[in-house]
Amino acid sequence: MDTTTTTEPKIQKARSRLQRSQAVTQQPNTVSKPRHAAHRVSTSQKTQLSTYKYFRYSPLLLISLIHIFVLYRVLTTIDPASWKNVVIPSTYLPMLLLIVSTTFFTTSYIFLNTSRGIRFSLFVGTLFFLKFQHVVLSIPVLTALISVYSVVELISVLLSRKGDSKNKA
């Protein structure tokens, strides 16, 4: 008589699969949550993340406040006619550069996006340059400038989203 017994090893499921199969047998009428639902961020975590982003961009805020103070002091103490012909005649170039840099740092901090800040500061710089050149900023001129800025902003947002989707794939 042969005393050797052949026992086949039992194949066990992984714990995660066991839990899923047990949950399905216990609650057959419930709809299971999608797998990504566990990774959703709560409202308090979103607030903490946005606070962290503003904290991360705090050097821009500091530089922005310094630029705002310098711009205020320049506008209240220096006569604009003395800046009119500094580098390029009739451009008010130093004042224009100060306005553009102040706008850049401020809007970069507000939007938490330096590329959007630079686009907005160039738009504001264009408006000031046209005003310094005595161009009448009528409704059609402002409409054209705002529409050009809006189209550029829309294209850049769409391209950045397309680039993000390629990076995730």
Image (cartoon, helix red, strand yellow):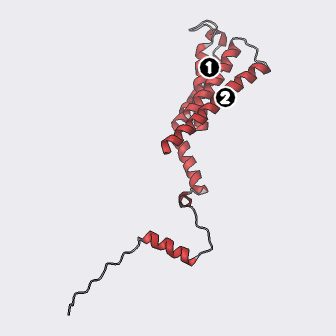
Tell me the residue at 63%/21% (across/down): 125
What percent of the width, then of the height, locates residue 138? Answer: 78, 18
Which one is nearer the viewer's eye here, 41 or 125? 41
Residue 122, numbered circle: none
Q: Which mark is residue 74?
A: 1
The residue identified by callout 2 is 151
Q: Is residue 159 visible?
A: yes
State the SS at label 1: helix
Q: Residue type at mark 1: give it.
A: Val
Q: Is residue 49 above or below residue 113?
A: below
* Residue toward you, 168 or 60: 168
- The residue lying furthest to the right in this view is 139
**Residues under numbered marks 1 and 2 in contact, where contact means CB atoms less than 8 Å apart:** no
Query: Residue at 56% across / 42% down in the picture?
Result: 54
The percent coordinates of residue 92 (x first, y second) are: 62, 12
Left or right: residue 13 versus residue 164 is left
Quarter residue 146 falls in: top right
Q: Please indicate, yes or no, whether residue 68 appears anywhere in the rendered image.
A: no
x, y percent for residue 128: 67, 19
Quarter of the image holding residue 41? bottom right
Lateral position of residue 32 relative to residue 13, left or right: right
Q: Nearer the viewer, residue 16 or 121?
A: 16
| Label 1 to label 2: alpha-carbon separation | 34 Å
Position of residue 47 measured from the top left corner of the image (x, y, whole percent):
59, 51
| Residue at x 53%, y 41% (from the top left corner) | 164
Residue found at x 58% / y 64%? 33
2 w.r.t. 102: above or below: below
